[in-house]
Structure formats: structure tokens, C-alpha cells
Amino acid sequence: MNLRKAEPADQPTIRRMVWQAGINPLQLDWRRFTLAVDDDGRVTGCIQVKPHGDGTRELASLVVLGPWRGRGIARRLVEHALAQNPPPLYLTCRSGLERLYERFGFRALAEGELPPYFRRLARLARVFGRMWGMRETLSVMRWDGPRA
């Protein structure tokens, strides 16, 4: 498995993967993506770091296709993104995934620690979560760099 920068022709593949994974389909600019590809050049996973208007950057759009899960591809994509981007980096995930991201040094933030973009997002998620009776909540996490 290799990692490479996305190219213009990868945009449809990125969109399809993100839609099929049921994650946020907004701001899918191929120029921000790193792709995992198999030995035949087929895309097996993706990740991006996207900027927000308040100056924050978010680790986002992490997808590994079903047949390739459990092979360390997500770990390699996350580690690569962290190595290529200075802290802080934020991410959003279901609360049940916090432990996964804690392994990389992310920590869940309290409401008072949230930057403006993520504060708005968390409020919307709470409202919709209650309306739809969701059990898990949205977690906003921050990475402040490698642990000492």
C-alpha cells in the first residue's frame, strides 16, 4: 500500500467514497487529499485536511474501503496527515470513536474550548441528534502535536 497526493482525475472517486461512507460530503477539494492506493494503483482510502473560515484546520474525510479495512491503512493515512501538518488540528467524530483518535494524541474538547466553526457545528449536531434520537453525540477533538 502506498500513499500519494490526489490528482484532478481522483475527484469522482473521492466523492463516491465519502458519500458511500456517509460522512460529511462538503468541501471535497481533491487538492487537499492524500490517497492510499494498492499495488495496482486502485484507491483504497483517503483523508484530507480542510481549512475553515475561522482559521482552524480539520482532519477530515477519512475513508478506507471495506475490503481493505483492518490492514493499518487508516492509521497510515492519519499518521501521514499529522506529519505533514503543524498543530493544532481538529477533527469531528462520533463519540464512540474518541478512543481511536486518542491513540494519535487527539483529545476531546469541552464546549468552552471550541473554536467558532466547531462551536456552531456542535450546536447543530446536538439539535439534530435530539430530533433523530441518536445515541452517540458529536465529539470535537484537537491534536496539539506529538506527545513528549
Image (tube, rainbow, N blue to C red):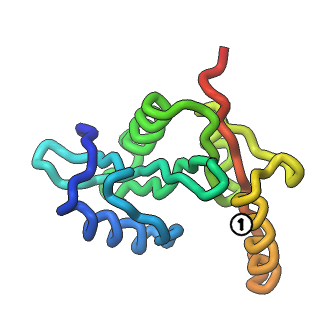
Residue at position x 42%, y 73% in the image: 19
**Which residue, as the protein is rendered here, is positioned at the far right?**
112
Q: Residue at x 40, y 41 (%)?
A: 77
Q: Nearer the viewer, residue 68 or 106?
A: 106
Give the x, y percent position of residue 30: 32, 58
Does residue 146 lie above or below 37 as drawn?
above
Classify 10 Å Cα crowding around label 1: few (below 14), some (14-19), many (20 and above): some
Q: Secondary structure at mark 1?
A: helix
Which residue does the numbered mark 1 point to in the structure image? 121
Question: Quadrant of the image for the C terminus?
Answer: top right
In-image side of 57 versus 148 (left or right): left
Taking depth in this image into account, of 109 and 73 the one nearest to the observer is 109
Q: Is 129 positioned to the left or the right of 32 in the image? A: right
The quadrant of the picture occupied by the N terminus is top left
Number of residue marks: 1
Name the residue nearer the viewer: 19 or 71: 19
Above or below: residue 77 compared with residue 31: above
Q: Residue furthest bottom?
A: 131
Residue at x 54%, y 31% (from the top left corner) = 86
Tell which residue pokes out farthest to the left in this image.
40
Residue 72 image position (x, y, % from top left): 40, 39
Q: Is residue 51 left or right of residue 38?
A: right
Residue type at mark 1 is: Leu
- Could you say where residue 88 lies in the image, as x and y percent from the top left? 64, 36
Residue at 40% across / 73% down in the picture? Answer: 20
